[in-house]
Amino acid sequence: MAKDYVPEKDSDFNSWQKSFVDYIIANASALVVSTSEKNKLVSLRNSWKTDYLNHLTAQNAAKGATETKEETRDSYETAIRQLTRKFQARAETTDSQREGLGITVPDRIRTPLSEQIVQSESPPKVKARCTSPKQVRIDWYPSQVGTDSGAKPKGIDGVAIWYAEGGIPTDNALWRFLALDTNSPYIHSVGNNATVTLAYKAQWFDKRKRMGAFGNPVTVAVTA
C-alpha cells in the first residue's frame, strides 16, 4: 500500500500544507485552479494556522499547569506528613482521632510474624521522578490497584531501595543498596555534576529485616 502523501503528524503537516498552498498560489494558471478554489484553500489555511497555534498554546499551558500542580502537591504533601508525624508522636492522640484524620491507626493486636509473609507478598511498585536538580523523589506502594504511596501490607515494615547508574543494569552486581525506608516517599540526594540516568528497584522487608522479592525497576533522568 502506497504511503499517504499528507503527513500524519501535525507539525509535519503544518510545514507541508504551507508549501502546498504557496505553490498553488504561484502556479494557479498552469495548474488550472479557479479563483474560488484558491480562495477556499487560503481561507482554510488561515483557519488552520489560528487553530493550530491555539492548540500549541493550550498544550504548553497544560504542561505548565501539570508541573505547577506536581510542585504544589509535593509541598502540600510534605506539610501534611510533617503534621501527621506530630500527631502520631503525641501520646494524647487517640485512635478515634487517627480514624477521623484518615491516618494510620496502630495495630494493637500482636500476631505471630510469619516468615512467609514477606516472601508471599507481591513486590512493591516504585515511582521515581526528579523534583529538582540533584534530587529524586521515590514513591513506593503495594502493587494492588488503588493503594496510596506509603501504604504497607500487613506484616511489612517498609522497603529496601536499591539503585544503579546508567539505567537498568544487566549485571545484578551493579545494583547498590540505597536505604531502608518505612515511610514513603524517600528523597534521594544525588551528587551528580551532569544529567545522569538512575535506575531504582525495591523489595519489602518485615520487622525482622527479612527481605522479599524485587519489584520491576524504573529509571529517571536526574539533572545537575
Image (cartoon, rainbow, N blue to C red):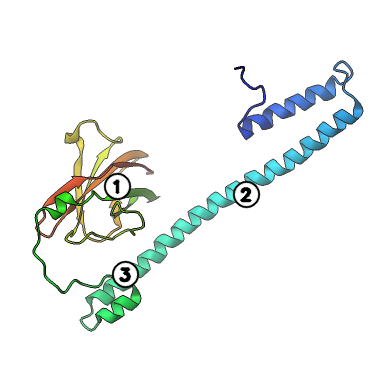
- Which comes sooner in the sequence, label 2 or label 3? 2
Residue 134 in view:
no
Q: Which residue is mark 2?
A: 58
**Separation of marks 2 and 3 at Cα, in angstroms:** 36 Å
Disc 3: CA contacts within 10 A as few (<14), some (14-19) or many (>=20): few
Disc 2, disc 3: CB below 8 Å?
no
Which structural element holds mark 1? loop
Q: Who's the residue at 37% across and 68% down the image?
A: 79
- Which comes sooner in the sequence, label 3 or label 1? 3
Q: Which residue is mark 1?
A: 190
Q: Who's the residue at 58% across and 47% down the image?
A: 60
Q: Quadrant of residue 34?
A: top right
Quadrant for the C terminus, please: top left
Q: Which residue is mark 3?
A: 82
Which structural element holds mark 3? helix
The spot of residue 173 in percent (x, y) is 16, 35
- Which comes sooner in the sequence, label 1 or label 2? 2
Amino acid type at image mark 1: Val
